[in-house]
Amino acid sequence: MSWANSVRTVLLVCSTMMLGVVVSTVSLPALPGPA
């Protein structure tokens, strides 16, 4: 069942990256940064 663990890991990494991108996209314009 190692393929199931591989698929689960890939899905977890992809969803984590997508969540990070969404959070960055939403929160970056609200933060006072060096524009």
Image (cartoon, helix red, strand yellow):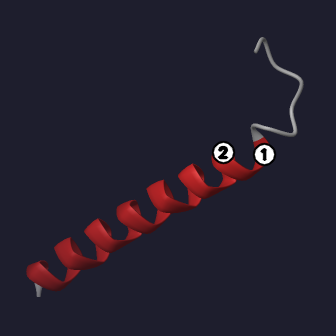
Locate the C terminus and report the quarter of the image it occupies.
top right
Give the amino acid type for the residue marked by disc 1 in the picture: Ser
User: What is the x, y in percent for residue 32?
Assistant: 89, 24
Q: Could you tell me if the residues under marks 2 and 1 are in contact, i.e. CB atoms within 8 Å?
A: yes
At label 2, the amino acid type is Ser
Q: Nearer the viewer, residue 12 or 24?
A: 24
In the rendered image, which quarter is residue 19 located in? bottom right
Residue plotted at (29% across, 78% down): 8
- Seen as rendered, the residue at the extreme top is 34
**Relative to 6, residue 4 above or below:** below
Q: Residue at x 55, y 50 (%)?
A: 21
Locate residue 13 relative to residue 27 in the image: left or right.
left
Element class at badge 1? helix
Instruction: Please report the residue visible at 66 percent of the width from the left and 45 percent of the height from the top.
Output: 24
Furthest residue in direction front, as rendered: 35
Q: What number is the disc on residue 27?
A: 1
**Which of the labelled discs sits on residue 24, or is there none?**
2
